[in-house]
Amino acid sequence: MDRNQPRSYFGLVVILGSVWGLAECLLGATLNSCASTISGSVMTGVALFFIASTWSLTRSRLSIVGLIFLVSLFKMFDAVLLGLPLRHGAVANPIFAFILEGAAFLALASLFTAKAADRKAGQALLGGSAALTAAFLFPLVRYATGIPACLAPGTGIPLSVYYAPLAFVLSLLTVPLGEMFGARIKAMGAESRPPALGVAPTYTASILAMALCLMLIALFRIV
């Protein structure tokens, strides 16, 4: 009977999105309008870790959309604490980057065979390719938000392109690690089934995780 009940990873996706949102806000703590040197490339690697973890856990495009929506809400919450408008470069442009990273990952993942996707080399290639795709498409942000991409000091090259090799190398590592992390969670049977009575434990944990991460961001900004 229990085996036939549908499994839901919603709570786990919320937890992953909350932790990613916390990491994004802390890593971007010093940003005013533009990324500083390598920070954007580092955050690309971090983003792809959480995207890969969610993909390994659910194999659902909708879950990736939900993950990106949640981290975008975290970015907006941080903007409110900082008194920044949502169309500020430190808010709208990172959200555009989240969308690009998720879209690049999903588009490239659909091109990989199941056999290649299960191999660490294939996962690394997927990560590096997604990072490069997102980095080279990011300058289009000016058409999406009206805010141009930041340029590397002393050059006319967008930071995302200038430091694309770093994002590539980091994502060669973070995507296989994310795939491994998601698979490990799945193997532990951490998914939740609709309970006969009450709320599934992972749903409760997801609410607590989201509240805790939001509280940490608020405390960080106040202090």
Image (tube, rainbow, N blue to C red):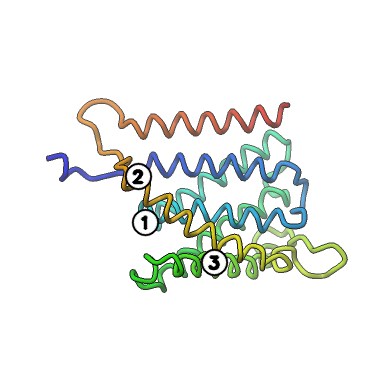
Q: Is residue 189 left or right of residue 150?
A: left
Q: Measuring from the top left, give residue 82's x and y in whole percent.
A: 72, 36
Q: Secondary structure at mark 2?
A: loop
Q: Residues within 10 Å of mark 3 (few under 14, many from 20)?
A: many
Position of 21 relative to 142 (above/below): above
- Is mark 2 in CB contact (under 8 Å) with mark 3? no
Mark positioned earlier in the residue sequence (1 or 3): 1
Which residue is rendered at x = 63% and y = 33% of the image? Answer: 217
Task: Name the image quarter holding residue 152.
Answer: bottom right
Q: Residues within 10 Å of mark 1 (few under 14, many from 20)?
A: few
* Residue tagged 2: 9
Q: Which residue is mark 1?
A: 60
What residue is disc 3 on?
130
Residue 38, placed above or below residue 18: below
Q: Amino acid at mark 2?
A: Tyr
Q: Are marks 1 and 3 in contact (CB under 8 Å)?
A: no
Marks 2 and 1 sit apart, C-alpha to C-alpha, by: 10 Å
| In contact (CB < 8 Å): disc 2 and disc 1 | yes
